[in-house]
Amino acid sequence: MKANHAADDVGLLKEALPPLPEPVANPALIVVSGLPGTGKSHFCRRLAERLDLVILESDSLRRRLFRVPSYAREESARLFQACHGLVEELLRRGISVALDATNLEEHNRERLYHIADQAGARLVIVRMEAPPEVVRQRLERRSQRQDRQDQSDADWGVYARMKPAVEKIGRNHFAVDSSRDIGPVVDKIVRLVNR
């Protein structure tokens, strides 16, 4: 029954996807990690301007599975099981993916590393960060719903609760301070993916 539940969840998430780009021989999995307000979604949108990929944004996908999200541990486990299944399916079809999620704990990221390895996909890991005062300003703007593209409900309290859970990334990765110009890192990743 659990396997059917997972397959149904992946199917629901697939229905929310925009039209897929053409498959490529060497797809990429770009894992974007960081606390709320550090610029993950903006960074993914900038990448998508330059690369043919699908952005899987955990906040909007969560609402696809749960009309009124509770953010409980069980809910998150079910969401990420479905996200990982969808990532796997897309990579096997030759579709590059940017996963926009906090991805704060290494054991959760390791599952993504394994998926990329199994699919023969190029793995790119990005850790987003920003000074706390910048994050606080962004999250205050979020609470006023000033950015229509922002799908997250996370506020400063969520940021503060999640901060102790941040674990060091055990593989080579890009560290990006989104309070600065992100263009040079976007350029590097585009070159890396297209190589």
Image: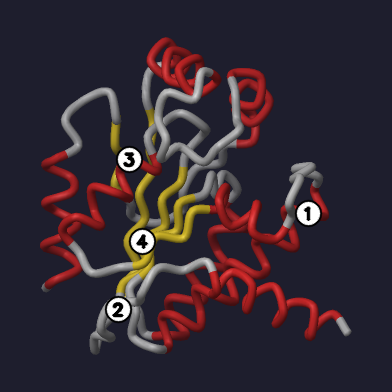
Q: Which residue is drawn at 46% across and 60% down?
A: 56
Quadrant position of the N terminus in the picture: bottom right
The answer to whether 76 appears left or right of 188 in the picture is: right
Specify how the rendered protein is coloured: secondary structure
Label disc, if present, on residue 27 of the rendered structure: 2
| Left or right: where 103 falls relative to 184 | right
* x 64%, y 36%: residue: 165
Residue kind at label 3, given as amino acid type? His
Q: Do the residues labelled 4 and 3 touch (CB within 8 Å)?
A: no
Secondary element at image label 4: strand
| Residue in the picture at 65% in, 54% down | 62
Q: Nearer the viewer, mark 1 or mark 2?
A: 1
Residue at x 29%, y 30% (from the top left corner): 178
Query: Which residue lies under the disc numbered 3?
Result: 42
> What's the distance in space between the residues labelled 1 and 2, CA to CA?
29 Å
Q: List the residue tagged with mark 1.
A: 75
Residue 115 coordinates in the image, percent (x, y):
50, 76
Residue that label 4 marks: 30
**Residue farthest to the right, as pictured:** 1
Q: In the image shown, does 175 or 186 lie closer to the viewer?
A: 186
